[in-house]
Image (cartoon, grey):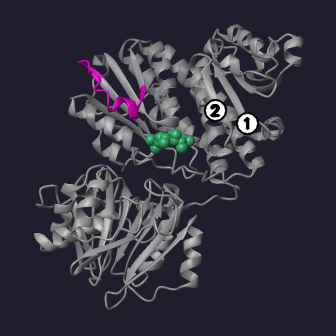
Amino acid sequence: MCGIVGVVGNPEAQQIVLTGLQRLEYRGYDSAGIASLGAEGQLTTRKAVGKLQALLDEVATNPMGPSTIALGHTRWATHGAPSTTNAHPHTGGLGPNTLTVVHNGIIENYQELKSEMASLGAKFLSETDTETIPYVIAASLAHSADTMAQAVHAASKKFRGSFAFVVMKNGENNQLTGTRRGAPLCIGVAENANYFASDPLALAGITSKFIFLEDDDIATISPQGVEVRDATGKPVERPVKTLDLSTDLAGKQGYKHFMLKEIHEQPAVVSSILQAYTTADTLLPTLPMGSLNLAGVTYINIIACGTASYAAMVGKYLIEQYARVPVNVEVASEFRYRNPPYPPGGLFIAVSQSGETADTLAALEHAKAAGQHILVFTNVTTSSMARAAHAVIDLMAGREIAVASTKAFTAMMTTLSLFALQLAAARGLSAKEISTHITALRTLPNHITNQLTNTKPLEDLANHLTAASSMLYLGRGSLAPIAFEGALKIKEIAYIHAEAYASGEMKNGPIALVDKNLPVVNLATSTDGLFEKTVSNLKEVEARQGQVILITDTEGATKLDTHTRDKLTLLTVPTVPAFISPMVFTIPLQILAYLTATAKGTDVDQPRNLAKSVTVE
Ligand code: AGP
C-alpha cells in the first residue's frame, strides 16, 4: 500500500516520478504528492487529494522549476484522512537539518516518537505516523550520525512496524537514502542517475536493472552510484537483476476496464500454466518443488489473504481428496499471531498474487523460522515472498492491474490443482487417473472462452441487482470457496453487502435474512454428487420468498422440475468434471460483479477504500 518513487541525477526527475506514480496508483489512490530540490537545494512540494490526475493537474498549473532530484508518493490512508496536509511528502527538521520523506507502511510507535520529538522542538502539522520520520532522522544527524546512511540506520532502530521510506535532505540535491522493513523497495540502476521505487513497474522504460533491498538495508543513491549497507551497517553487494517489463505496460488494449481485460485473459493464462507445468505426452504435473520430498509431506498449512485464501480453500479440497494429506487453510492475519504448532514433515504454502501482502509474508517468515519447508505460489517472482521461499510456483498470469483479482485467482486454483495431483502422484495415485484430471484441465481454456462470448443473461441479472442492498452466495464442496469469492467480488466493486456460506450452513442462522428483497446466488454442479442437497437448500430460500438465482451446469438444469425452474433465475455453465468445476463456476460470478458494478457506475478498477497490494497489517 502506498507507492514510492525517487529519482536522482536525471533532469527529467519530476516527469519520471509522476509517470512512475501513475503506474503505482494500484497501490493507493486517495492522495498524491511530489517534492524536488532546485539547483540551490531549495525545496518545492506539490500535493493533491484524489487520483493521481489531480496531482498532474496541480503540477501543470503550478510548475515546480528545474531539478534533477525528486521524490513522489501515492497514498492509501492509514493514519489521517485523505487531505493535502496528510498527503506525502512530509518535511520536518531540527537544527540545521531539514528532511523530506515519502513512506509506505506504518510506524507503530509513532505516538511515543511524536512526544519525544515534540520535546526536542518538532512541530507536527499532519495526523500521520510518517511525519515522525524526518524528525527522528534529523535528531540522529544532530547527535551521532555523520552521514544520511548512518542517520537513517540509527533512526530505523527506533521505528517499530513494517515500512519502506525514502528521504531527501533539503539543500543536498545529489543523493537520496532509503530503507525497508517488511514493505517492498527496490533500486533502479542506470548510468548517471539512480532510482528508488516500490515496484520496478514504476521505472519501466527508464531502466531494466534492479536491486531488491533486504530487510533493514540502508541504500544511498546518487548520480554516481549506489551504496547499500546491511542491518549491521556494513557495506554489502546485493545482486542486480535484469527485468523485462515491456509486457507490463500493455494498457487496456481496447477493453473498457483492466478488470474486463484480465477476465478475458484467463483462457490464455490457464493454457500457459498447463504448457509450463504438465508433460505434453504423458499428461503429468511438473511443478518445480526444489529440494522438497513430496512423498514425505505429512501436513500442509496454506496461508493467504482475501481472494488468495479462497483459492487456497479449493486447494485444500483437492489435496485432501486426491493426495489424502491433511491441510489447514487459514487467513494470514490470524495464523501469524496464534503461535501454531508445526508438525515434523510439515509444508507451509503461501499463496499471493503480489507476493508482498504483509500478513502473508509475516506468516511465511514465522513458519520459515520454525524450520518448515516454504513453497510460494505467486504472480511476482521477484517479490519478497518469492525471495524468501525454498521453491516458487510462478502463477504466470501476467501483471494484474485491477484491484479486484480475477485471472490470478484462476491461476492460483489451476496451479493448486496441479499441486494436488503432483502430491497425489508422489503418494501413489495412478498416472492414469492423474492424466484424466489433466485432460479435464486442458479443456478449461475453451470452457472459459465460451462463457465469455454470451453474457446477456448475466447483464439482465446485473441490471436487476443494482437495486439490491444485500445478497447471499451459497455453494457446497469445492464450490463453497467460489461462493465466498463471488461475494467478495460483488462487495469490492459493486459495493453490495454480500455474505457467503457453505449451502448447508444457511439453515443455521443466515436463513433469518431471507425475504423477498434478498437475492440468493446458489452454485450447484451435477457432477459432484451434491446436486440434490443444494437444490433442497435453494427450495428453503424459495419457500421464504427469497430471490433464488441458480448457477448450475447444463446437465444440472435438466434435473430441475418445472415448478422449481419457473421460480428461479437460471444461469448455466458447461457440464464439466468436478475437478475443474471451481474454475468454471468462477467465471459467471466475476462477470456478474463486473456488470453490476458498471451498471451502478462505480470505479471498477480502483474501487473505493481499497489498494491492490496490502503491505500493512
Ligand atoms: C481480491 O480481489 C482482493 N483485492 C484481495 O482480497 C486480495 O486477494 C488480497 O489482498 C490478497 O492479495 P495477494 O494475493 O496479493 O496476497
Q: Earlier in the sequence, mark 2 or mark 1?
A: 1
The stretch of residues the image draws in magenta is 330-346
As drawn, 562 above or below 580: above
Q: Residue at x 34, y 43 (%)?
A: 385
Q: Quadrant of residue 172?
A: bottom left
Residue that carries the numbered disc 2 in the rendered image: 486
Residue 340 on image: x %, y %: 29, 23
Q: For the residue marked with disc 1, what is the amino acid?
A: Ser
Residue 101 shown left or right of residue 500 in the figure: left
In magenta segment, residue 447: no
Q: Nearer the viewer, residue 115 or 321?
A: 115
As drawn, 56 above or below 591: below
Residue 460 shown left or right of residue 153 in the figure: right
Q: Nearer the viewer, residue 161 or 261?
A: 161
Residue 381 on image: x %, y %: 38, 47
Residue 283 on image: x %, y %: 49, 25
- Secondary structure at badge 1 equals loop
Q: For the residue marked with disc 2, what is the amino acid?
A: Gly
In magenta segment, residue 336: yes
Residue that carries the numbered disc 1 in the rendered image: 469
Q: Nearer the viewer, residue 582 or 180?
A: 180
Q: Quadrant of the C terminus?
A: top left
Residue 283 can be seen in this image: no
- Secondary structure at badge 2 equals helix
Q: Nearer the viewer, residue 126 or 137?
A: 126
Q: Residue at x 22, y 71 (%)?
A: 138
